[in-house]
Amino acid sequence: MDAQEILLVEDDLDIMDIVQEYLGAAGLEVTGAVNGEEALKLFSEKHFHLVILDIMLPKVDGWKVLREIRRISTIPVIILSAMSAEEDRLKGFDLGVDDYVVKPFSPKELLARVRVGLRRNEEMDAKTQLSGFMHKGFSVDFASRNVAVDGEKVKLTRKEYELLEYMILNKGVVLSREMILEAVWGYDYLGDTRTVDTHIKMLRESIGPYRDLLVTVWGTGYKFLVEG
């Protein structure tokens, strides 16, 4: 089996060397880019399975790189940045990032999160054989990952979609925030379950008139419910 390809976008060469060495030792193929312009060029020329992206980059910053990647691809993207403010994290998730790692970081933890991203991507690919879900004017096509509300296509971030699909596949089941974090994010979010609440809120806004399908179970979590 060929090694999975990672695009690492990082202008700090010391960090670049550490990540390339650590991920390379785990059997991953890591291609480095030192600025946003080079990253976009490499992304257009080569197939990658996951992107690790710094934000503060020369020439083209990481936010612009992320927007361009999301315009054309659903590839897993992990932000690796010294920008630790909550608004930066939320901006990343809103733009469709899969994970957010703050510097200084543990290479071992980064590898674990990379593996989660790669595994989730494989699981999503495997689900293309499933059909989807429909309720009144609300539909989800698992193969194309298209979501429509009353005939209009709805644009979701990657995590919004994965959260929605997970809840649909477990409809009627009360899902704790911890269960959702483990299933959708794939690891313990350091005990902070607020990211689940944030994504539920975003998802409700996205599906509008069908927001009531996402039911809050007070003191526990959420469930996807279809009456009747």
Image (cartoon, rainbow, N blue to C red):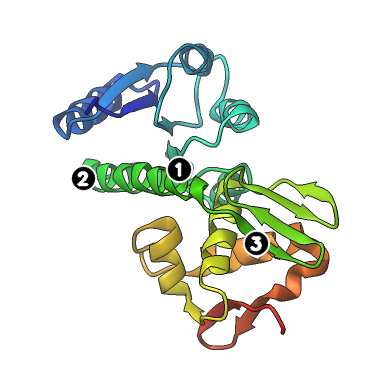
Residue of label 1 = 125
Outermost residue to the left? 25
**Which residue occupies 48% across, 18% down?**
43
Residue of label 3 = 133
Disc 3 from disc 2: Cα separation: 38 Å
Q: Is residue 70 above or below residue 129?
A: above
Around disc 1, counting alpha carbons within 10 Å, would you say few (fewer than 14), some (14 to 19), or many (20 or more)?
A: few
Disc 1 from disc 3: Cα separation: 17 Å
- Say which amino acid is labelled 2: Lys
Around disc 3, counting alpha carbons within 10 Å, would you say few (fewer than 14), some (14 to 19), or many (20 or more)?
A: some
- Say which amino acid is labelled 3: Phe
As helix, strand or loop, the secondary structure at mark 2 comes to helix
Marked residue nearer the N-terminal end (3 or 2): 2
Considering depth in this image, is 60 or 78 the residue closer to the camera?
A: 78
- Disc number for residue 108: 2
- Say which amino acid is labelled 1: Asp
Dot in front, 1 or 2: 1
Residue 99 image point, x, y percent? 45, 47
Marked residue nearer the N-terminal end (1 or 2): 2
Q: Is residue 123 left or right of residue 97?
A: left
Marked residue nearer the N-terminal end (1 or 3): 1
**Which residue occupies 78% across, 47% down?**
153
Q: Are marks 3 and 2 in contact (CB under 8 Å)?
A: no
Q: Are marks 1 and 3 in contact (CB under 8 Å)?
A: no
As helix, strand or loop, the secondary structure at mark 1 comes to helix
Q: Is residue 228 left or right of residue 191?
A: right
